[in-house]
Every structure is written in structure tokens, then in C-alpha cells.
Image (cartoon, helix red, strand yellow):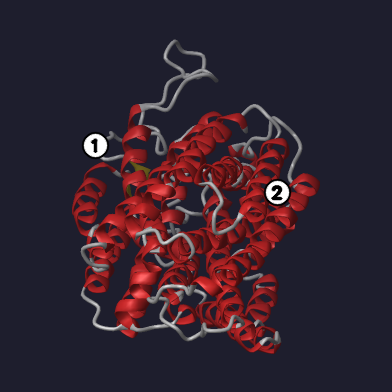
Amino acid sequence: MAGTSPPTALDHPDPPNLRPHGSEPGSDPVRGATRRPVNGPSAPGPSAGIDRQTRLTLGVLVLGGLMVVLDVTITNVAIRSLSRDLHAPLPVIQWVTTGYTLALAVVVPTSAWLAARLGTRRVYVAALALFGLGSLLAGLAWNIGSLIAFRVLQGVGGGLVNPIAMTIAMRSARPEVRGRTMGVLGLPVLVGPLAGPTLGGRLVEYSWRWIFLINMPIALVAVPLALRLLPRDAPAGARERLDVPGLALIGPGLAAVVYGLAESGRRGTLVSATVLVGMCVVFVLRALRLRTRRPLVEARLLGRRAVASGAGTLGLSVAAYFGSMFIVPLYWQLVRGQSPAAVGLLAIPQALTTGLSLQVASRLIDRVPPARVVGAGIVIATAGLLATLLQLDANTPYWHLLTSMAVTGIGTGATIMPTITTALRHLPDRDTAAGSTLLNITNQVAVSVGTALTSVLLAANLASLAGLDQGADLSGDIPASATGGVVAAFRHTLLLPVALMAVAGVVALLLLPRGGGDKAPAAGEAARAAR
């Protein structure tokens, strides 16, 4: 009706202002194809694949997502080199990874508001550009403090990429192919961990700066393609105001929690974590009480079983997986004496099985009950981590460890993206953006917490050994007399990822939806819920 405010693109079940570049008025606002009668000869059937416009959109989103995933994994093989060149101990160096992933989590809650005010296309392009700038500055960093600061800037741009990409992808695809769509969107999970450690290992041999500068060519290609190919969408106006008090609570709150966990591990007490978690508790309580306008994070979505169980499964499994990925490269270098380039090659089997398993699982959940797929995945991942833990020694045959790590990859690939898809497919379109925001926060905080806890636990275990110091820069060789103790330190630290993954399995098997034909609510149902 004339004179009324247009509906927010993120709230409307079928947003009228989303139109692919070059589409004509009257075309489908989501798929960019002219509407045809449902019973007409050209109507897509249940088995129809992903249409051309959606494929082009996904291609751009995958390229942008590759940069973000690549930068999470590429630094794992450089931890020892960074510690040596920047003269920083392990508890400080881990913030190169933790600061980045934490910034991802902090900025994610603003994605829905920014998309409504500026449009998803504009926000996505700006996020890619900011990520590229942060990469350039990180490559030029002069000390550990400046590197961590520029990594945070990278995270601010990268944190907007995934939630905006998920929103665009879920709206571009028909409900019956959303599992396949999310499988395509998960391709960076295959390519990133596969290329990241391998590429990073090679680049570190020249200079650690190149592990950040390598993002510049990708950004220079991704930004123009996004401008050309992503669906055009007009800003929805100022209907929703930014929840500034919520942002002031959740940003410092998340940072304080991770810092508190790190300090608690270092001091051997949980006092720091207990005190600093208060800001996040206040944020959640406030979000649950807000009735008049949309809060920064829709905590009420956790009242839905699929979302709550999905968030729990995702958080625990991601913390376990990325915690182990932080530990294993250090084991190869400290205990087995491998170079960063060799460590990158040793990561290939696990990365390959993770990506391949993800593609298979993303298609299975369109036909098989999600709880079975995810539950089986977590059981396999737990078995792989446990096998790695039990075999870990100074002389374990390489193929034994590579096999158990590949098994972990198979299980993880069948867990992470299928869990996200399962949670989102139960939401009406108007809640998709808020749901993806909530799950992305869960994912990134889990990476931060998993990395922080495992690094501090490993540092504490190493510090207990004679001849080693928690503040050492990890650049020296391990004395032969201390090798057994170092191996024991890695074993004790790996107990944490094994336990977290096992708990994730309990949550998935008991609480994830068991129905096999779960679909997103129909547009009519979503429209009624929006009133």
C-alpha cells in the first residue's frame, strides 16, 4: 500500500526487492526466472536441479567463502614460524587465530541489520573488500600486536561473508534442492582445508607474510564478480534499528569469555571465565525480553528444537575439530621434526575426506533423517580422534596417523554443514537470516574457544616438563630426553577434543529432528507467522 514502509528483505518470506542482475520485472524475485504456471510444461519438478542463475550466484559465494575458510586453516602450519619470527609464546601466538575467529563471531550479529539497511549484495561486496584490506595490512604487520589487530580487521570483513552468503543462497534455491545448494556452498570446506595448510606450508618457507598476502588476488577477482553476478536487492530502509546495547554486550562479552578461558587455563582456575561470562548471560536475558523490535540475535529461535539441538551439536563438534587441527600441526613439527611444507602435505588426506564426506552428507539429508546422518558422522569423527590419541607416539608409522585423521575428516564432513542445513530448513524464510546469524556465531565462537582451550592446555602441559618453559618461542629443538614428555603433553591435550566430540554425539543422537521429510515452512505459513 502506498505510503507504508516496505517490508524488510530479511523479514519477508518471499522478498519482493530481490532481483537477479538483468532479470525483468515480473520475474521470480528469488530465482530470477519468469514465473510459469505450476502445471505448465516448463515448471520445475521435484527432481529438477539447481537453475543457472542460482549456479552463478553460488559460484561467487563459494569464491568469497574460500578466502575466509582459507585464512582459518592457512595459519595452523605457521604457528611455530610466527612464534620464532615475532618472539611470542604459544598463548600469545594463538590469538592470531583466535582473534580472527572471534572477530568473525562478533560482527555476525550485525549482518541481518546491515543487509536490511544496505542490501545483501552491497554488504557482501563491502565485506570482501574489507577482508582484502585486512589481508594486505596483516601481510605488512611489524610485530605480534599489529598482526593480531589486522587479523581482527580481517575478521570483521570475513564475519559478514558467511551469513550473507547463506541468506542469498537459501533464498536463491527452491526448498527441494536446498540440501544440494548448501552442499555447493560448503565447497570451501573442501578446498580451504585442502589448499590452506599445503599452500601455507610452502609460503611460510619464503615468509609468513605471504600467507596473508595470498588473499589479495582472490579478493581482486571476487569483488568484480560479486558486483556483476549477485542478485540486486534494494535496501529495505530504516524500519529496523540496530540493537546498540545488545552489540555492546555481545562483542566485549564474547571476547571476555575467550580471554577468561585462556587466563583460567594459564592460572589453573576457572574464576576468570566465570566472572567474564556475565556479559553474555545478560545479553541473552535481554534478547529474550525484547518484544517490541528485533534484537541483535534472535535468542528466541533456540526455543525451536531443531535450532537448539543444531547449535549445541555444531558448537561442540566444531570446537573439537578445530582444536585438534591446532594441535596436530605442532605435533608434526615439534615431535617429528617436519617442515611447514611437509606438514601441509600431511594435512591433505584429512582435508580431502572432510570435503568429500560433506558433499555426500549434504545430499543424504534431503532423503535420510538428519539425526542418522549427523549422529553417524559424529560417531565416526570421535572414533578417528580417539584412534589418533591412542596411536600418538614419537615413532608411530605415518600411515597409521594419517588414516585415523582421515577417518576424523569423514565424520566431520558428515556433521558440520548437514547440522546447519537441518536447523535452517525448519525455519520460515523470514527467520532464515536470523537463524544463519545465530548458527554462524555458534560456529565461530566454537572455533575460538576450541583453539584457545587446546593451545592453553598444551602450553600448560609443556610447561610442566623439565627443560621447557611455557613462555618459550617454540623455535628450538626438543631435547631427546624430553621427547616422551612432549608426546604425553600432546596426548593429554587431545583428550579435550575427543571428549567434546563425544558429547556432541550425545546431543545429536538424542535431540536432532528424526523426521526424514522435514522441509521449510510454506510461504503461506511463514506469512501468517509474520503477522
Q: Residue at x 49, y 40 (%)?
A: 182
Which sits earlier in the primary sequence, circle 2 or circle 1? 1
Judge whether 482 appears above or below 315 on screen: below
Q: Mark 1: which amino acid?
A: Gly
**Alpha carbon of mark 2 to alpha carbon of mark 1: how far?**
37 Å
Judge left or right: residue 268 versus residue 256: right
For label 2, the residue is 306
The picture places residue 290, in percent across and down from the top left corner, at: 65, 73
Instruction: Please provide percent x and percent y for residue 222.
Output: 24, 50
> Which residue in the rendered view is the most extreme toward the right?
510
Write the residue at 44% across / 63% down: 111
Amino acid type, residue under disc 2 in the picture = Ala
Identify residue for label 1.
22
Q: Residues within 10 Å of mark 2 (few under 14, many from 20)?
A: many
Q: Which corner quadrant of the image does residue 179 belong to?
A: top right
Who is closer to the viewer here, 508 or 489? 489
- Quadrant hosting residue 96: bottom left
Question: Dot 1, crowdedness within 10 Å: few (<14), some or many (≥20)?
Answer: few
Q: In this view, does 5 lie above or below 83?
A: above
Q: Is residue 344 left or right of residue 209?
A: right
Label 1 element class: loop
Work out whether 135 lies above or below 225.
below
Which is more toward the observer, 398 or 130?
398
Quick check: can you spot residue 147? no
